[in-house]
Amino acid sequence: MRLQAKSLSFSHPGQKPIHFPDINLDAGQSLLVLGNSGSGKTTLLHLLGGLLRPKNGEIILDGVKLHELKGQRLDLFRGKNIGIVFQKPHLLAALNVRENLELAHFFGKKEGQKTIELLKELGLSDKAKSSVLTLSEGEAQRVSIARALANAPKLILADEPTSSLDDTNTEKVIQLLQNQASKIGAALIIVTHDQRVKQHIPNYIEVKAS
C-alpha cells in the first residue's frame, strides 16, 4: 500500500491558493504535518481523506486516484480504506460506544476489526454499552480513535489528537496510534501544531499559508 500526493493545491473562496508539499508514504510509516493555525494543515487532512477535492494535483491511495472518485464510490472507498480521527469526536449520542464503532462497519460494508477486542486494546472494554454522553473527554477521544480503526483502514488520519493533553497522555495517544497502525499495516498521518509530537514522529513536513 502506498499513499502519494502530488502537486496538491486548494483555495477557499476569496482566499489565495494553498500549495502543499508532496507526500509519499508506505504501509506502516508515520508522517507528521506541522503548521500554525490557519496554515491549511486541516485542509490537507480533508483532501487526503476525500472530504475536499483539490484544485490541482492528485492523491493516489493503493493505486486508486482518490481525487477522481465521486458520490457513493467515494463514500464507500473512504469507509473501507480511510480512518479519520477528527479534532472533536463527533460521536452519535443516540448510540452507545459499541454501536458507534459498528456504524463504521455498516458504512464501510466491511467487517474490519472485532469491536470488543478493539475496545479492550484501547482500555474501553467496560464502556462498550455506555452512552457516549457519560464519557470523559479522554475516553471520548479513544472511542473516536477506535471508530477510525474499526475497519482496519489502509490510511489513518488524525487531526490535532494531542492538542488538549499533557505530556504523559500525549505520548500515550501517539504510541496508541502508532501501535494500531503497525498492527493493521496502515500508514499514519498526524496533523498538528503541537511541536512535542516531533519527539515521537521525526518524519514531518510543514504547511505554510502563502
Image (cartoon, grey):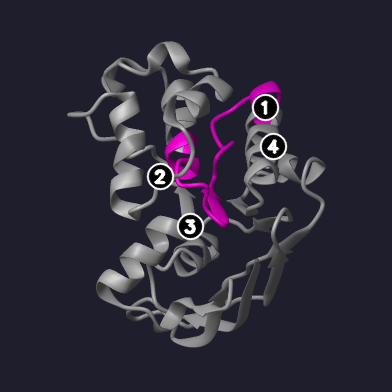
* Amino acid type indicated by mark 2: Glu
Closer to the camera: disc 1 or disc 3? Answer: 3
Question: For mark 1, what is the residue?
Answer: 172
Q: Nearer the viewer, mark 2 or mark 4?
A: 2
Earlier residue among tags 2 and 4: 2
Q: Which residue is mark 4?
A: 179
- On residue 111, which mark appears? 2
Q: How many numbered circles are shown?
A: 4
User: Which residue is more in the foreground, 189 or 40?
Assistant: 189
Of pointers 1 and 2, the one earlier in the residue sequence: 2
Which residue of the protein is positioned furthest toward the left in this rendering? 94
In the image, 180: left or right of 135? Answer: right
**Residue 18 visible in the picture:** no
**Is 117 colored magenta in this rendering?**
no
Q: Which mark is residue 99?
A: none
* Residue at x 79%, y 57% (from the top left corner): 203
Residue 149 at x, y = what percent?
50, 42
Q: Is residue 47 above or below residue 148?
A: below
At label 4, the amino acid type is: Asn
Residue on which disc 3 sits:
82
Contact between labelled residues 4 and 2, with CB atoms less than 8 Å apart: no
* Viewer-nearest residue: 178 or 103: 103
- In the picture as drawn, the residue positioned furthest to the front comes out as 111
Give the mark nearer the N terminus: 4 vs 3.
Answer: 3
Q: Determine the CA span between mark 1 and mark 2.
A: 27 Å
**Viewer-proximal residue, 129 or 188?**
129
